[in-house]
Amino acid sequence: MKENGSSAQSDAAPTLESVKALFQQYVAPTYGRFDLAFARGEGCQLWDVGGRRFLDFGGGIAVCSLGHAHPELAEAIAAQARTLIHISNLYYHEPQGRLAEALVKLTAPGKVFFANSGAEANEGLYKLARRFGHEEGRFEILTARNSFHGRTLAGIAATGQEKVKTGFGPAVPGFRHVPFNDLDAVRHAISPATVAVLIEGVQGEGGITPATPEYLLGLRRLCDEHRLLLMMDGVQCGQFRTGRFHSFQRLLEGVPGGDGFLPDAISMAKSLGSGMPIGAFWIRESYQDLLGPGSHATTYGGTPLACAAALKVLEIAHRDRLDQNAREMGTFVKEQLQALVTRHPALLREVRGLGLMIGIEFAPKESIPALAKSDKPVSLQMVDHLHAAGLLTVPAGTQVVRFLPALNVTREEAEEALTILRAEVEKLANG
Ligand SMILES: *Cc1c(COP(=O)(O)O)cnc(C)c1O
């Protein structure tokens, strides 16, 4: 060991093996990682430690909205770092105020709290709901089956998937799950203790399932009737990914009554900082002062650095019409994938999603001979095959492969990704 604690090896260029060895010895083994170690990126491209190029359609799980190493974002971060990185929330600073203003203008009148991640933004929603119902003894939040809300204790209690809960009981009380897109199920589940409903506009980890317009409008009516907060987790589907800033704005486009729809609170994170860690939740005007001084806090939340980055992301998204690009590229990719599904009905079930949040569902493993022998789920096997072919994607559940590229992805990059996927599907078709 050298005096600075780094191993003598660190002078040599890193390899997958050398990086993996560090992880195996020093990093808690909570993740099932792929055998890939990356060194640098540019736009929708990443290069691994050996210098091999990959096309990145995972986008760091819907995070890198401007792609990798965006020069203007890098410059904004560097300039803010040279000026002021952090002061705590004991004091005011302009970037946090300006970012809150921008998010309110993209949403509706209300106020914003800044956190550092999606799970932490959602924690704020749970506390808002509990504070709202406190005096009446109401605390219960209804969430959807197959939802995902993060990995904190309350996050796994809110998440409608057993696999995140196993081994971590007793669960935080006050969450119950109902089938997604089923209004009657919510209606029947409401108890005297119920205070809120929380859903994703488009379920991400659950397999890219959009909420139906009737569901959204019906939930709004139901919540009004029963004085429940309607809260939306926009961590993955928000921030322009669907082609509008919030997914519900896109889902309700052109739907009668859709214009007036507004949830009571919305969490945000992933694409907001294009990789700079930041989370936030917006609270509707009627409830905007419910969480008063001393009721909620986080040391890092809304640092000058994170806010300067997010402000630059929003500025570039606006200037470069990335909402429009997400919409156009999303439509193109989805149409092409749809054609692939039509051509291979025995292998592919369905394409779902909106904008640049797209999932392709594969048939059950038993019906795909080329994948049936492995223990791994179909989604993981396909992601592995795509890696070998130079394309990064993200699995969702056992059957779905997700495309979550940067919002500035080009037509050429989309075509390249489709060409790679088509070739892999053809290989499956040929056994
Ligand atoms: C990723 C995700 C979260 C959790 O965000 P973290 O930043 O990982 O804590 C919560 N909700 C949804 C819908 C997500 O996709």
Image (spheres, rainbow, N blue to C red):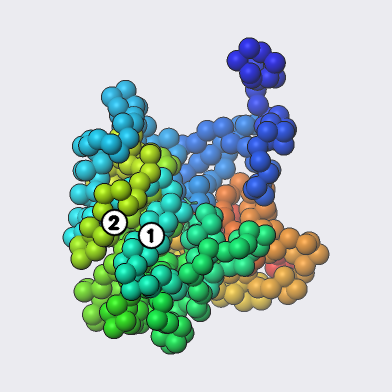
**Helix, strand or loop status at disc 1:** helix
Left or right relative to 348: residue 427: right
Of residues 375 and 299, the one nearer the viewer is 299
Q: Report which quarter residue 365 is drawn in.
A: bottom right
Which quadrant of the figure contains the C terminus? bottom right
The image quadrant that residue 7 belongs to is top right
For the view shown, which residue lies furthest in the right direction?
373
Please name whichever residue, 93 or 309, is drawn nearer the observer in this view of the structure: 93
**Residue identifier under label 2:** 291
Residue 85 x/y as whole percent: 34, 29
Tell me if 365 is positioned left or right of 3 in this view. right
Is ligand 1 within 8 Å of the beta carbon of the residue shown at mark 1? no
- CB-based contact (under 8 Å), mark 2 and mark 1: yes
Above-or-below relation of 229 to 169? below
Image x and y of residue 350, in percent: 55, 73
Q: Judge whether residue 251 can be spotted in this image.
A: no
Residue shown at 26% from the left, 41% from the top: 96
Identity of the residue drawn at 65% across and 73% down: 363
User: As shown in the figure, which amino acid type bears the numbered disc 1?
Assistant: Lys
Mark 2 falls on what kind of element? loop
Q: Is 320 above or below relative to 27?
A: below
Q: Position of residue 137 (x, y in %)?
A: 37, 72
Q: Earlier in the sequence, mark 2 or mark 1?
A: 1
Whether residue 384 is visible:
yes
Residue 220: quarter of image: bottom left
Quarter of the image with the N terminus in it: top right
Q: CA distance from mark 2 to mark 1?
A: 8 Å
Residue tagged by mark 1?
127
Report crowding for label 1: few under 14, some 14 to 19, many 20 or more residues within 10 A (C-alpha). Answer: some
Give the residue type at disc 2: Leu
